[in-house]
Amino acid sequence: MKTKNTLLFVLFLTGTVIVFAAPLFFDKEASYMFLDSINGVSPGTNGHLLGTDTLGRDVLNGLLSGARISLIISMLTVCTALLIAFTLNLATSYIGNKRVQLNVFQILGFMLAAPFLYYYSFTAFAIPWFAKSLIFVGLLGIIMVILQLLRNTSKTTFDIPLDTIGLKIYELFSSVPRLMVLLIFIGLTPKNSILSISLVIAFLLWPIFFRYIRLEILSEKGNDRFTSLKNLGYSNIRIVFRHFLPLMLPILSTPIVFALVSTILIEANLSFLGIGLGDEYVTWGKLLAEARRNTSAWWLIVFPGACLFFVFMFLNHWLRRSDKLQ
Amino acid sequence: MLGFALKRLVFTLCSIPFILWIMLALTRLSPVDPVQQLIDAHDYSADKQEQAETYSSTAKRLGYNKPPFYLAVTKSNYEAEFYRFTYPLKKQFFSRFLDENYSYEATSNLYNELQILRSQHSNDVLENFDETPTASVLIENLRTEIIARDSIQSFNALTPLIERVIESKNSTYSLLPRFLFFGWDNQFHCKLTSIASLQWGNSITDGKPASNKIFMAFRITLMLLIMALIVGYTLGIYLGIWFHRKPQSIVTKFLEPLFYALRSLPLFVFALVLLVVFTTAELSPMLKIFPAVNAYGWSSTDSFLANFSKNFNQLILPTLCISIYSLSYICRQVKASLERENSALYNTTGKMKGISSWQLFLHRFRNIRSILITMIGSGIVSGFAGAVLIEYIFNIPGIGRLILDSVKSNDLVVLLPAALILFVASSITLLISDLLYRYYDPKIALNEN
């Protein structure tokens, strides 16, 4: 078992070196370097070791130069999706249905402030979106402080069911058609970069992680350990990151592995909608999707599929160690 | 328990208007103009005047000439009539000026004059003014255009109008918002009342009643979902337990990588291979087990079960496709969560007490029930609209395909009720899974009180 692990590690190391050293040997236009006038040749002909795709680009070259982009996109996407799911859970299910109580004047005050919040952060000034979101966060903080000052004005209070609201957000995202979200992104993102594509896919993928994190938070909050940690005076941040997070990893490892792999496949579908990477980039997903145009080209499915399979098996093996509780 | 369920149901009902509002806002964010899209698809004409007339009548028919919501919070130079513009180019032109604090009146004078010039002289020259990014660039372009067409007298009439627009720029406009109230006659209210009174109207693409289309699609998706869930999760949980209990057996060593290999292929490859192998007689005379895929027969007089048995044989292949594709995920999750339980201390205690390994396994299995519930619940929620590709390949008129088609053609009459039905269905699924959490995992029930 020990030698098998070492062997896998060495394999992974060589793979990484090849993938990230590839740009030293081929540049960004690498995909055009081995362009062949005969489109879609099978492996072994005209010096193409693994054949070419429908545009006449070399598959081996595409696999090597596409690996970097595919892996970077999938890592970025999964990290962002986990971050969204985790933050939303902390804001909703960790706080719970009964912890936040507002009185009548606080609720009225918030309803009065909401239109102004919307106006000053989104419509009033013609500035870039990140400046708008900064204004939004700042104004939200000011409103929070005002609401805090109003807390002693009345004794009639209402529970704010934050956990249920979080679930409703999840339901909204799982029932709004994905194509609609994608079409809106086409309108909003100015240029198709690796970052914007990762953001789009992360926006579609975060619901996968949401409910597993919620389950773990709900069940750990009922545990005696939570009460004793609270009584020891530990902060919420410490409890979540030091004590809850290690327990979540075994459950989350499966969705993480599958999200990493399916991101590579989803990315290719975005190209069909016009929000994927341009034709100058080759990715594994695009090579697989090329098979749709040329259904008899088995080499377009087998070789990228095999690469994906090896990544799958490696991730699986690597994350399996986290399945055991420490 | 009952109070919890009732509270959640009431909350779901109350959140429906809010969800509808978000969906409408999202459709307004979309870069495609729904009216123009419908006109391009059905009655396109080259004549400019005719085009504008068709546009306004179509917009009126679909209700796009109404204001979007009960009220709007805007800059102080916006007027209420701005929200009744249906022609998107006019709207863009105005909002470009208004966002940079020019006055409404001067802008509308300039726009009217431009329209007159456009109809009198040249249709194509002033066209590109609608696509310039900012108001100042637009003004510059206008000026160069005037200099270039110095010979035409009427173009000089634009110069004083442009001067007035520039003078009207006022930087103090944006400090306080303006609240515009539109009353009951708005798009949101019309949609809400028509959906709440269950009169959803006719689809704008083919004129069939929306409710018929939606319920037909929903029932077929439900059949497919039930079959795929039963097959996928029974097999998946069983195999996951097998992989966990006998990691060294040949079955595990063969099947586990096989599932991952299937998952590494795109779904359409897998589905097409299944379709070709099992339905083509010429290719594989021994394997032609399933019927060729054709239209789904559904009679409204028969019961759900009778229809189910009638369409059963056609649903076998899609079911197999979905369930085999998701097997690797289910197996791995079951195995991983059982392995997590395996390292808990009660296993050591159990071994010391001398209970059998089967009973120890049962202890572990009881602890992962809530994870299974989460997995199945998420599977149902994503399965409602998630099998779009399968529905396309096997020609199933399901709800995922219906929604995709209505998004493509901007058919809000079908899209909004269908999405709301999916919302309610997933709410009920998640409510049931939350109730099951409380039943199987007392720790969760504990922290509610």
Image (cartoon, coloured by chain):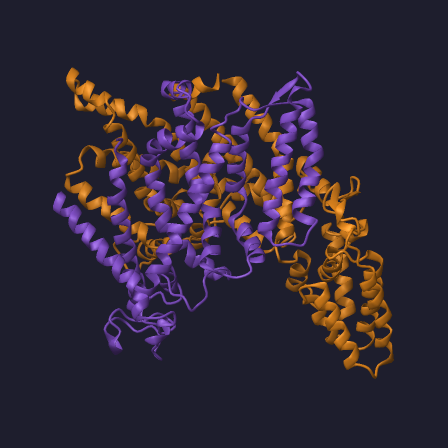
Residue B174 coordinates in the image, percent (x, y): 75, 49
Residue A92 coordinates in the image, percent (x, y): 51, 31
Q: Which residue is depicted at the point 45% across and 62% down?
A: A277
Residue B119 in view here: yes
B368 horizontally vs A213: left or right: left
* Callout count: 0
Q: Which residue is depicted at the point 37% across and 55% down?
A: A72
- Residue toward you, B9 or B396: B9
From what the image shows, is residue B24 above or below residue A158?
A: below
B348 horizontally vs A255: left or right: left
Residue projecting furthest to the bottom: B151
Residue B209 in view here: no
The answer to which image quadrant residue B279 occupies is: bottom left
Residue B426 coordinates in the image, percent (x, y): 50, 35
- State the hue of chain A: purple
Residue B330 coordinates in the image, percent (x, y): 32, 39
From what the image shows, is residue A176 above or below residue A95?
A: below
